[in-house]
Image: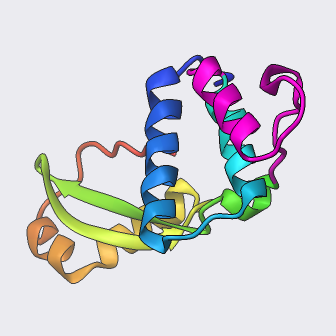
């Protein structure tokens, strides 16, 4: 929302809704929280949801749910390694890996070594 990526926000709400449907249960508090999140995109539907779940007052006046950023950060990521424009390996590494360590791990991977044998690395592109 802060970056004005509304399609992404709506997509995440749809993913949440699909997850709720899979579990086949939701508390009224969770449903009200979903309504508050939905209110930015469908205010009338969110207000109706709030009313039907026993919430009082206007949904627009409710405070947004808070979250703990440390709980949603990935600890490991998949780092693709390309040689000659083709993915040769995917490494599972710490999310805060530095370029030197990533390059070292990539060069040590057996499949990458096969393509680097007797070759000089001309260009390295590392995206944090």
Asked which quadrant contains residue 123, the reply is: top left
Q: Is residue 72 above or below residue 123?
A: below
Image: 116 above or below 29: below
Q: Is residue 44 magenta?
A: yes
How many circles with numbers are drawn on the protein? Answer: 0
Residue 98: image x %, image y %? Answer: 58, 58
Q: Is residue 47 left or right of residue 98?
A: right
Query: Seen in the image, is 17 located left or right of residue 54?
Result: left
The quarter of the displayed image where residue 4 is located? top right
- Image quadrant where one finds the N terminus: top right
Instruction: Write the residue at 53% across / 32% down.
Output: 9
Q: Is residue 2 magenta?
A: no
Q: Position of residue 109 (x, y in %)?
A: 28, 78
Q: Position of residue 28 (x, y in %)?
A: 74, 57
Q: Nearer the viewer, residue 1 or 106?
A: 1
Residue that appears at 58% across and 62% down: 95
Q: Residue furthest bottom?
A: 110
Viewer-nearest residue: 44 or 126: 44
Q: Residue at x 40, y 65 (%)?
A: 78
- Residue depicted at 65% across the width and 37% down the height: 49
Q: Position of residue 77 (x, y in %)?
A: 48, 64
What is the image's colouring?
rainbow
Between 20 and 70, the residue placed more toward the observer is 20
Boundaries of the magenta span: 40-67
Q: Is residue 43 above or below residue 125?
A: above
């Amino acid at each position: 929302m802060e970056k004005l990526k509304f399609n992404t926000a709506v997509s995440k709400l749809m993913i949440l809704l699909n997850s709720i449907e899979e579990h086949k249960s939701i508390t009224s508090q969770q449903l009200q929280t979903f309504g508050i999140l939905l209110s930015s995109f469908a205010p009338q539907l969110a207000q109706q949801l709030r009313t039907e779940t026993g919430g009082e007052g206007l949904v627009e006046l409710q405070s947004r749910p808070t979250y703990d950023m440390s709980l949603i950060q990935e600890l490991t990521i998949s780092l693709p390694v390309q040689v000659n424009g083709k993915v040769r390996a995917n490494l599972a590494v710490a999310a805060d890996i530095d370029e030197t360590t990533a390059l070292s791990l990539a060069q040590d991977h057996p499949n990458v070594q096969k393509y680097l044998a007797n070759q000089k690395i001309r260009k390295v592109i590392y995206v944090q």
